Amino acid sequence: MRILLKILITIALPGVAGAQNTIAPDAAIRAALQNHPLVKAAAFEVQAKKYAEKAAVNLPNPEVNAESPTGQFYVVGVLQSFEFPTVYARQKQVAKAETALALAGQRINENDLRYTVRTIYLDAQVADYQSRQWRTRDSLYQAIAVAAHRQFDAGEIDFLQKTLVENEAGKVAQEWRAAELLALTATGQLKTLTGLADWDALLPLRPDTTGLGGISGSGANPALLYEQQAVQVAERQVALAKSKALPNFSIGYMNQGERETPMDYRFRASIGLPLWVGQYRAGVNVAKAESQAAAARAAAQSQTVALQLQRTDTDALTALGFVRYYEQEALPRSRALISAVLRMRDAGQTDYVTFLKTLDEAFAIQREYAVQIQAFETARIQRLYLAGQ
C-alpha cells in the first residue's frame, strides 16, 4: 500500500493534467469581445451617436404656402427658418462629445467583460485544481479503506478504526463529486461567455507575479474616463444653452403685390429677438448645474479608483507573501509530513485516527495554497480592471 500511496500523493501535488486543446485567458477574452451581445450593443450605440452627428444641423422644414394677398389671384411662397449659425456649430460639438461618451461607455463594457472572463477563468482553474486533487484523494482514501477492511478482517484493527476510515472515504468521495460538478459548471460558464467549445483544458493554476509590473495607473480607468468625458459633454451643453439666447432668422419668397411687382420686392426676411431673457438664463443655469454635478462625479470616481487601487495593491502583496510562504515552506513541509506519517503507519507506530488526521492536514495545506493563489490572482485581475487593461 505504501507505494500506491506515494504515487497517488505525488499526483495530487500541484500540477496540470495533459490535454489536447488548451485555451489561454487572452484567447478567451478575445473570443468574448467578438461574440458577447453587450459588446455588440455598445458598438451599435456608438454607431447611432455617429449618425446623430450628421443630424446635429437640424434645419426645420421649409414652409410652402399659397395665398391671395390682393384678393385677385393666388401666389405660392416659401419660407425657411434657421437658428443663429453658432447654435448649429455648438450642436455639432455636443454631438461629437456624446459620440466620445458612447465610445467611453463601450470601453467600460469591454473592461467589464474582460474582468468577468478573467474571473470565471480563474474560478475554472481553481475548480479544476480542486477537482483533480479530490479525485486523487478519493482514489487514495478508497485504497486506505480497502486496506483497513482487510486489517479488520485479520483482527489487526478494531471496529472503530475501520468505521472511521470508511466514513472518511465516503466524505472524500462526496467532496470529489461536488468538486467535479463545480468544475463542470465553471467550464460551461466560460464556454458560454466566449462562444468557444473546441477546448478541453485550461492553463495550470499558477500565480502570475510577472504581470504586475506592466499594469498602468488609474489614469486609464474606463469608468473615470467616462465621467471625465461626461464633464466635456456637460460643458458643451452649457455653451449650447448660451447660444440659444442668440437671435434666429427666417427668409422667404412671396409676391405680396401685383403680378408685375419686381422680383427684388418679392422676398421677405425676419429676425427673432430673444426678449425673454429669464427663460434663457434659467436654461444656462440648469446646464451649469449639470456641468458642476458631472465634475463632482468625476472627482468622486477618481477618489474611488484611487482607494480601490490602494486596497488592491495591499491585497496583492499580502496574498503574494502567503504564496511565497507556501511555495518555500508549507508545501515542502506538507510533503515531509506525508512521508513521515506513511513511514509511521507502515511501521504500525500510529493508528488510523492520527494517520487520517495528518493526511487531512497535509492536503489542507495544498488546498490553502490554491486559495492564496486565487486571492493573489483576484487582486491582479482587479488591478487590471482598475487600469482598464
Image: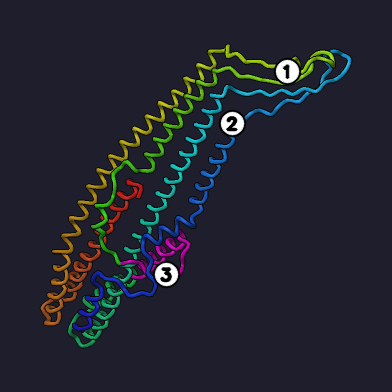
By secondary structure, the bulk of the magenta-drawn segment is best described as helix
State the CA–CA distance, disc 1 to disc 3. Answer: 75 Å
- Frontmost of labels 2 and 3 is 2
Q: Earlier in the sequence, mark 2 or mark 1?
A: 2
Q: Residue, x 32% and y 53% (percent of image)?
A: 381
Element under label 3?
Answer: loop
Label 2 close to label 1 by CB (< 8 Å): no
Q: Which residues are magenta?
A: 176-203
Q: Amino acid at mark 3?
A: Trp
Residue 192 within the segment the image draws in magenta: yes
Nearer the observer, 355 or 130: 130
The amino acid type, in three-letter code, at marker 2 is Val
| Label 2 Cα crowd, 10 Å radius (few <14 / some 14-19 / many 20+) | some
- Residue 344 found in image quarter: bottom left
SS class of the residue under badge 1? Answer: strand
Residue visible at 78% across and 23% down?
65
Distance from the alpha carbon under mark 2 to that under mark 3: 52 Å
Out of 97 and 142, give the one closest to the viewer: 97
Residue occupied by mark 1 = 267
Vertical relation: 147 (above or below) 219: below
Q: Residues within 10 Å of mark 1 (few under 14, many from 20)?
A: some
Comparing marks 1 and 3, which lies closer to the viewer? Answer: 1
Q: Is residue 300 above or below residue 280?
A: below
* Real-space Cα separation, disc 2 to disc 1, in angstroms: 24 Å
CB within 8 Å, label 2 to label 3: no
Q: Which mark is residue 199?
A: 3
N-terminal of the pair, mark 1 or mark 3, is 3
| Residue 386 as seen in the image, left or right of residue 259 | left
On the image, numbered disc 2 is attached to which residue?
A: 57
From this view, report whether residue 74 is shown above or below residue 209. Answer: above
215 or 196, nearer to the observer: 215
Image x and y of residue 70, in percent: 85, 13
